[in-house]
Structures are given as C-alpha cells and as structure tokens.
Image: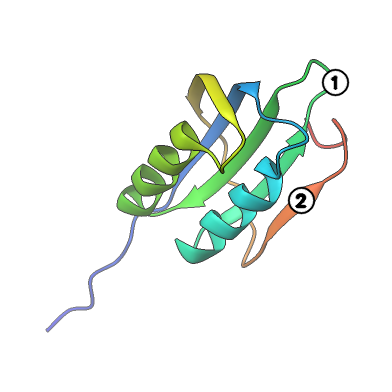
C-alpha cells in the first residue's frame, strides 16, 4: 500500500477591515499551526494584514475560512488570495513585525 503524498500549495492572503489591534496575527498563527501550515503573517502600514501559508489544499481551505471570520473583535471586510511561490520552510508559522518580508 502506497503512502498518500500531500501536494503542497502556497497562498498569499491580504486581509482588510478592522484587523489590526484585535489579535489577528496571533489568531492567524494559531490557526495555521493547528492546520499544520508553515508561513508568516505581518501587519501592513496601510492597516491590512498579510499572510503567506504553505500546506495541503484542505488545510489551506480551512485556514482561509477562518481568516474570513477572524477573531472576536475583528471585522474582515475583504480577503484577497493569490497563489504564491513555495516557501521552502520545514516548520513554523512566524509573526513578523511590519512589512519586513513583503
């Protein structure tokens, strides 16, 4: 019996609305780690939050659904999703200060 291989997908997310000052980055990190994703999340100077995540299709779908809702106190008004370049990370989902990686 062959082991089922997960095809990794990378997606970049831009989340707009009331998403800063409400714990959105920590929520994003916790959700990603629960889904077994790797990546990064950062606040942007324009008030948005940007994240990049890599993992299996189903895990990314659940991650995206969570981002659309956000944590209590947030209000997601828009979510843009683009295919991204592979991250090459083995593990971890990092909260980054500012626009350092964008």
Give x and y (percent) for residue 12: 56, 32
In the rendered image, the vertical position of residue 41 relative to residue 99, given as above or below: below
Number of residue marks: 2
Task: Name the residue rendered at 62%, 67% in the picture.
Answer: 91
Q: Nearer the viewer, residue 89 or 37?
A: 37
Q: Earlier in the sequence, mark 2 or mark 1?
A: 1
Give x and y (percent) for residue 96: 82, 46
Task: Name the residue rendered at 87%, 34% in the picture.
Answer: 98
For numbered disc 1, what is the local secondary structure? loop
Relative horizontal placement of residue 50, taking residue 12 as reference (left or right): right
Q: Are marks 2 and 1 in contact (CB under 8 Å)?
A: no
Give x and y (percent) for residue 34: 49, 65
Q: Residue furthest front?
A: 73
Characterize the local packing of mark 1: few (<14), some (14-19) or many (20 or more) Cα atoms within 10 angstroms: few
Q: What mark, if any, has residue 45 been given in the picture?
A: 1
Task: Name the residue rendered at 77%, 20% in the picture.
Answer: 47
Q: Nearer the viewer, residue 48 or 36?
A: 48
For numbered disc 2, what is the local secondary structure? strand
Q: Which residue is mark 2?
A: 95
Q: Quadrant of the N terminus?
A: bottom left
Q: How is the image coloured?
A: rainbow
Q: Nearer the viewer, residue 62 or 53?
A: 62
Task: Name the residue rendered at 59%, 59% in the picture.
Answer: 30
Relative horizontal placement of residue 63, taking residue 74 as reference (left or right): left
Which of the 4 image quadrants contains residue 43?
top right
Real-space CA distance between mark 2 and mark 1, rounded to the nearest whole angstrom:
15 Å
In the rendered image, the vertical position of residue 11 relative to residue 37, given as above or below: above
């Amino acid at each position: 019996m062959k082991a089922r291989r997960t095809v990794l997908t990378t997606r970049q997310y831009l989340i707009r609305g009331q998403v800063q000052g409400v714990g959105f980055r920590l929520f994003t990190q916790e959700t990603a780690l629960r889904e077994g994703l790797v990546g990064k999340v950062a606040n942007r100077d324009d008030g948005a939050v940007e994240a990049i995540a890599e993992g299996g299709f189903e895990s990314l779908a659940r991650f995206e659904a969570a981002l659309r809702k956000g944590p209590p106190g947030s209000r997601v008004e828009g979510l843009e999703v683009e295919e991204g370049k592979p991250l090459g990370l083995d593990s971890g989902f990092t909260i980054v200060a500012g626009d350092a990686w964008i």
